[in-house]
Image (cartoon, rainbow, N blue to C red):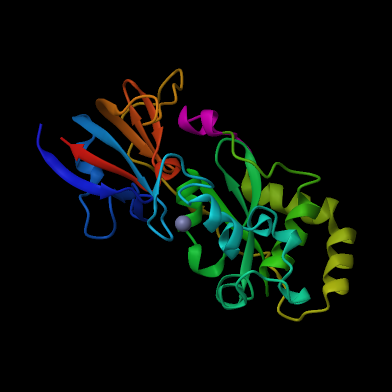
Amino acid sequence: MNEIWSGSLRKMTVTAASPVEYRMGGENGPLLNQYLGKKLSLHFEGKINCIECAVALKKSYQGGYCFPCTQKLAECDLCILKPELCHYAKGTCRQPKWGEEHCMIPHFVYLSKTSGVKVGITRHTQIPTRWIDQGATEAVPIFKVSTRLQSGLFEVLLGEQIADKTNWRKMLKGESSEEDLLERRDQLFEDCGEALDQLEEELDDNGIEFLEDEAVTELSYPVLEYPEKVKSMTLEKMPTIEGTLMGIKGQYLIFDTGVINIRRHTGHTITLKA
Ligand SMILES: [Zn+2]
């Protein structure tokens, strides 16, 4: 086998083609789609570096950081997992400038189909990257709002009716609900109409839009065959992961030997061979 890439892992770079195109190591890295049906191996030397400050680590936290960085970066704060807790307006954002650039900007609340239908939020600049990273096969924005906090409040409200998590095992098996996203959206608007109107009134922001006419974006992935059983592999437990590449979906490589979540290994130095 020959080395095709080596370096510190980042999430795969995606392009919304049909099927989605995946590259390892940034825009100029090798296109992984070309290795479908071929042998591929990832070898981990045991070296992990914090993706913020580059310090050498035994173990990374929150997907690639050293512990001190998780305590001082805004992007590692609890409000990133729970946007409804965004505290920028209270003046307590860990890095106000980062908050201005990433949170105090328009966001979308969307419905997507990963296996079942779920609700999620994203910055306007992250469409459709966010959906691809989750392995969604369909998605449609349903609200446009002015800030991350507002998107979180809408998500919490809708989360009473609809899942907000991806079942990644089902997503990787290619299982998909038959539900129609637009019908589900209309049903949600009907079922939650009063609560949604009330929230909009409380927020009193004319940047909030109910999106009733958005089209569904369909996404397809380079997959030869979905696994019947999903066996998860990590480089900590298995420093060399190899097999025939059967597919790529979300941020996972699907081998005939099991699956690996590339994003989970951010900051790990690896050599990729084909
Ligand atoms: Zn660090």
- Can see residue 169? yes
Quadrant containing the N terminus in the rendered view: top left
Question: Observer-nearest residue: 86 or 198?
Answer: 86
Q: Position of residue 104 (x, y in %)?
A: 64, 75
Q: Give the left or right position of residue 140, taking residue 185 as reference.
A: left
Q: Is residue 133 magenta?
A: no
The vertical placement of 174 against 79, above or below, is: above
Q: Residue furthest bottom?
A: 206
Q: Is residue 178 magenta?
A: yes
Q: Give the left or right position of residue 195, taking residue 110 as reference.
A: right
Q: Position of residue 84 (x, y in %)?
A: 75, 60
Question: Observer-nearest residue: 63 or 126?
Answer: 63
Residue visible at 73% across and 54% down? 186
Q: Position of residue 22 (x, y in %)?
A: 31, 49
Residue visible at 17% across and 36% down? 273
Q: Which residues are magenta?
A: 168-179
The vertical placement of 96 against 174, above or below, is: below
The total of numbered circles placed on residues is 0
The vertical placement of 205 against 250, above or below, is: below
The quadrant where residue 232 appears:
top left
The quadrant where residue 193 appears:
bottom right
